Image (cartoon, rainbow, N blue to C red):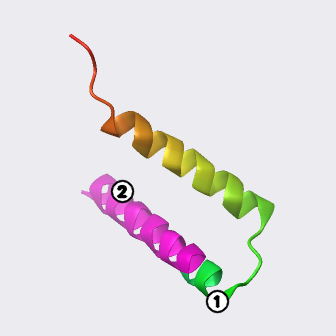
Amino acid sequence: MLLRKYRENKQALKQIGREALAESRRLGLTISAKDRQNEAKDRAKHERKDRVRAP
């Protein structure tokens, strides 16, 4: 039960972070190197999920 809540909260916090980065870009604010690095990792992870495996 607690582990499931933890995972849900973790995903929610990641989404908030993504939205904050998008808003920062929209406002023209600088984005830290660590944020850019995390964003690249997240994007790469999602690209792998989107790919269909060959049979």
Q: Is residue 20 left or right of residue 32?
A: left
Q: Which residues are magenta?
A: 1-22
Q: Secondary structure at mark 2?
A: helix
Amino acid type of disc 2? Answer: Arg
At which x and y percent is residue 39? Answer: 59, 56
Question: In the rendered view, does 45 fall on the left or right side of 54?
Answer: right
Residue 53: which quarter of the image?
A: top left
The image shows residue 7 at horizontal and vertical percentages of: 36, 56
Residue 50 in the image: above or below residue 26: above
Q: Secondary structure at mark 1?
A: helix
Residue 55 horizontal/vertical position (percent): 20, 10
Query: Which residue carries the number 2 mark?
Result: 7
Q: Residue at x 31, y 59 (%)?
A: 2
Q: Closer to the N terminus: mark 1 or mark 2?
A: 2
* Number of dots carrying numbers: 2
- The answer to which of 47 and 3 lies nearer the viewer is 47
> Can you identify the residue that label 1 sits on?
27
Q: Is residue 11 above or below residue 48?
A: below
Q: Quadrant of the N terminus?
A: bottom left
Placement of 40 over or under 21, stated as above or below: above
User: Does 42 appear in magenta?
Assistant: no
The Cα atoms of the two marked residues, 1 and 2, are separated by 30 Å
Where is residue 13? Give x, y as percent.
Answer: 46, 70
Q: Nearer the viewer, residue 12 or 44?
A: 44
